[in-house]
Amino acid sequence: MWLRVISAATVWPRAFEPARPRRARALRLCAVSLGGLLGLGAALAQADAPIEPEAASGRQIAREQFHARHAAATAHPLASAAALEILRAGGNALDAAIAAQWVLGLVEPQSSGIGGGGFLVLGESGGRVRTYDGREIAPPLADEALFLQTDGQPLSFRAAAVGGRAVGVPGLVRMLAQAHREAGRLPWARLFEPAIRLAQEGFAVTPRLHTLLGMAPELRRDPEARALYFQEDGTPHPVGYRLRNPALAQTYRQLARTRGEALYRGAMAQAIVDKVQHHPDNPGRLRGTDLARYTPLAREPLCLDWRAQGQAYRICGMGLPSSGTVTLGQILGLLTAARAEPQWQERPQADWLFTYSEIARLAYADRAFYLADPAFVPPPGGRVQTLWQPDYLAQRARLLGPQRLPVVEPGQPLGVRPPLAYGSDTTERGTSHLSVVDAQGLAVSLTSSIEDAFGARMMVGGFLLNNQLTDFNFQPRDAQGRPSANRVEPGKRPRSSMTPLIVYDARGQIMQVLGSPGGALIIHYVAKTLLATLQVGLTPQAAIALPNFATVGGPLLLETGAYPELRAALAARGVPLQDLALTSGVQVLQRVSGGWLGASDPRREGVVLGD
């Protein structure tokens, strides 16, 4: 069997050496100037939703970083520096990841923060994996009509996303507090020190933050956000402006003193509720009791076997309500069933990219139909592994032909189709990822999100609130009254695409720690990185720099201007093509002889630091 579920405590019996990375000849890699950076400081959820999670803001020149002991790859140099500070102070990878996340909430506010949620994968040398679910929850007063107008038609995405209606109960802080209680080393309060210092003293506005602020007119309507991020004339503070956020510094002090509970009880919690309930145009249904009762979940990790270049790997990530590992496993399994593992050297060939896109359409059809919060809608047979069964994957692979399938429908792994509606896709739009390893063999893969860029465009205590409920399907039922698996229900967690992963070799050694932002396209960005490094043999930086490709069932999305040599052949097979920036944000650490080779996506502003 090619794919199987593996116990969290499994230790692999055989040793081997991984495939040696090969640099792409055409790729010229140069050093990132950290000093310069610090000197500056899909058919988607709804029809009008932007297909790109966050706008492109230019491309930096990056190179791989080798570190012998420990390393951190995050979306911002200051967050990587905070992680390194904690590692050097004797903290472990989890401590460092938490400290980096607090900094990201300050310097990358459009993507993640304490007003949102996330998923964390914690791996130890030897094969033990723990996963934590800090996904937001629909308030108990929310129901399946949350995003419907009085005439029964769904709201536009923008009408739903801005304001209190789409704010879910945030889970990131309690999730990280739970993980820290179980596996942290340094005192909880110590992990806030880098972020508090930066919030108080200020940091330089980067080109990406400046660009995205200029594309967020709704954010200017919030008095607190306007005073913080914009000049008197309403334009964003310029690149290089020293931005101070004393309100967030004070919030972090309270979280440090209370192990995060200040967010869920007391004055801060009441301020969140007041903001949500009293939005002038789009109030929400969040209550103080909803915050107080939020519970993060320690879930069973979802692991699968995979072979690449004759080597055995174990890929471990999140289970539902994250669809990332499930759908990634289907894509990898279908590639094997179709005998379509990549044989290319430095760039995909037209035949392979065609097959990949068709396989992805099949996997995303199952995702949209079957996958949701398992407490409300169990997967087929009660186990997501049903979607990985070799017989089922072989059956799906037999649908593939020389031309594009005109229609792709969900499969029937149990031989019958349940009475569900085929729901449209969903995506997180404002998301961040970080990867950390320490010298003791602990690794963290953490993806966090406030959903849309700048979330609900509402600020409380120096941080932004999420609009994660827009990850539910707006139309809860089809014309026959059949429910969508991912419809809004009280207390339900919306389906996610986040795909934080830790990859093991046959000896139980951690080989890779990776993940990415990018909404419903995250799964493709992670799949591309896995295939290009472990199957093709590219170095991590060359794999990330490879132009992106993706689909969620509609056209094949290609990074703007990429693969000109393949387009005619793809079009001849009936593949509609669409150019997009495809702004991934992959952060990967890969074991090599003597240490770790780290890479950060040049499409964003991240960097790898370590010793």
Image (spheres, rainbow, N blue to C red):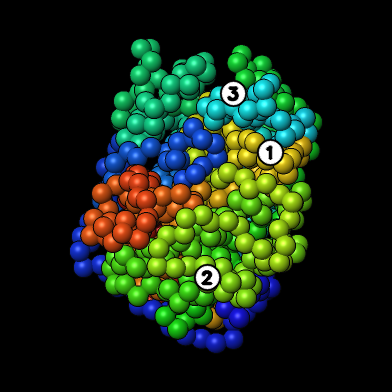
Residue placed under numbered mark 3 in the picture: 163
Three-letter code for the amino acid on which mark 3 is drawn: Gly
Element on which disc 1 rests: loop
Residue 592 x %, y %: 39, 73
Secondary structure, mark 3, is: loop
Looking at the image, is mark 2 or mark 3 earlier in the sequence?
Answer: 3
Q: Earlier in the sequence, mark 1 or mark 3?
A: 3
**Pick the front one: 528 or 335:** 335
Mark 1: few, some, or many residues within 10 Å (few <14, many ≥20)? few
Q: Name the residue under label 2.
A: 397
Q: How far is mark 2 from mark 3, CA to CA?
A: 44 Å
Q: Which amino acid does label 1 sit on?
A: Ala
> Residue 198, how many percent across, how many down?
45, 35
Q: In which quarter of the image is the C terminus?
A: bottom left
Q: Which of marks 2 and 1 is nearer the N terminus?
A: 2
Out of 590 and 335, give the one closest to the viewer.
Answer: 335
Inspect this view and state whether residue 108 appears: no
- Residue under pointer 1: 479
Residue 398, compared with residue 423, is above or below; it is below
- 567 on left or right of 176: left
Residue 285 appears at what percent x and percent y? 72, 26
Tell me: residue 53, above or below residue 281: below
Residue at image location 43% in from the left, 30% down from the top: 201
Q: Nearer the viewer, mark 2 or mark 1?
A: 1
Report the Cα–Cα distance between label 2 and label 1: 30 Å
Q: Residue at x 23, y 60 (%)?
A: 565
Position in image of residue 86 (x %, y %): 50, 52
* Residue at position x 62%, y 71% in the image: 392
Closest to the observer, 521 or 171? 521
Residue drawn at 43 percent across, 73 percent down: 340
Residue 543 numbered tag: none
Residue type at mark 2? Ala
